[in-house]
Amino acid sequence: MPVKIILKENQASGNFNDGEILEKKPIGFPQDGGAQRPYSNLFYWAHAFTSNKKSTIGLHPHRGFEICSFILKGKLKHFDTLLNKWISLDEGDVQVIKAGKGISHSEELYSNTEIFQIWFDPNIQNSLYEEPSYKDYKSSEFKSIDLKDKVTKVISDENNSLNLKTEGIRIYSHQINPGIFSFNILDGCYHSYFIIKGGISYSSSIYNKGTFFIVDNIKEFNFEVDDKTEIFEIISPLEPTYKTYAQTHSIN
């Protein structure tokens, strides 16, 4: 199917601290029961958000994966056992944890905050033997491309701005103006889209914030926008050159 649509209600759900932090998961863990399992070198994708109260996810470990947090709205504070101090991140900022041999971290989400946390698979068979690292990027470090029908924030392109070891990852955030719009789809790639704000009309249906699309094997993804809409995009390979964690553990 060239366009797979995963509605918000079909995504896995999660929460922390009795619902102070809520999650919808376009790509969930196998035990989460959502509609989409890992694919390409994307292992996990959570959209986490708070309401009118800040809340902390306590210290917990990670290994192997490259774990990126994208601050969509509000503010987050981060602590890990590598830096051993709290660091603040604001709207538009990105943090990259290369978990390597192992790192533990904690996050505090302020009130009315939204983030993506996405786990990329950099070839776990190698990364488990590498030293962990942490780096954050300020929103001002990312260039924007202003075109007639959209403004695109380039988070990581073919030049690998985030210095990820995960193969073939490109990341963009698009502010799309009302009208007919088209994304070009690259051969040999998945294009994964999440509607952050607004909505689109596609194939005679309306899709709003929280809808997730996986697109491949077509030339263009065409839709219509009535109001200004923000869409987050990740491009990843159809077939990474290495066996992913999901493949080696039969959880695709």
Image: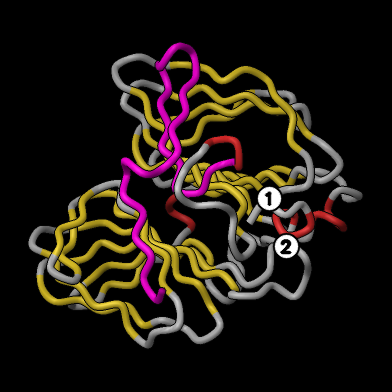
Q: Amino acid at mark 2?
A: Lys
Q: Which element carries disc 2, helix, strand or loop?
A: loop
Q: Amino acid at mark 1?
A: Glu
Name the one closer to the observer, 11 or 229.
Answer: 11
Dividing the picture into quadrants, the one containing residue 180 is: bottom left
Residue 93 location (% of width, % of height): 47, 45
Q: Is residue 111 left or right of residue 59?
A: left
Which mark, residue 66? Answer: 1
Compared to 68, does 228 lie above or below? below
Residue 185 location (% of width, % of height): 41, 81
Quarter occupied by the C terminus: bottom right
Residue 98 location (% of width, % of height): 73, 47
Q: Which residue is mark 2?
A: 165
Q: Is residue 218 left or right of residue 164?
A: left
Dividing the picture into quadrants, the one containing residue 11 is: top left
Compared to 174, does 23 lie above or below? above
Region of the chain picked out in magenta, as a range: 1-29
* Residue 19 magenta: yes
Name the one closer to the observer, 171 or 7.
Answer: 7
Q: Which element carries disc 1, helix, strand or loop?
A: strand
The residue lying at 48 percent from left, 64 percent from top is 234
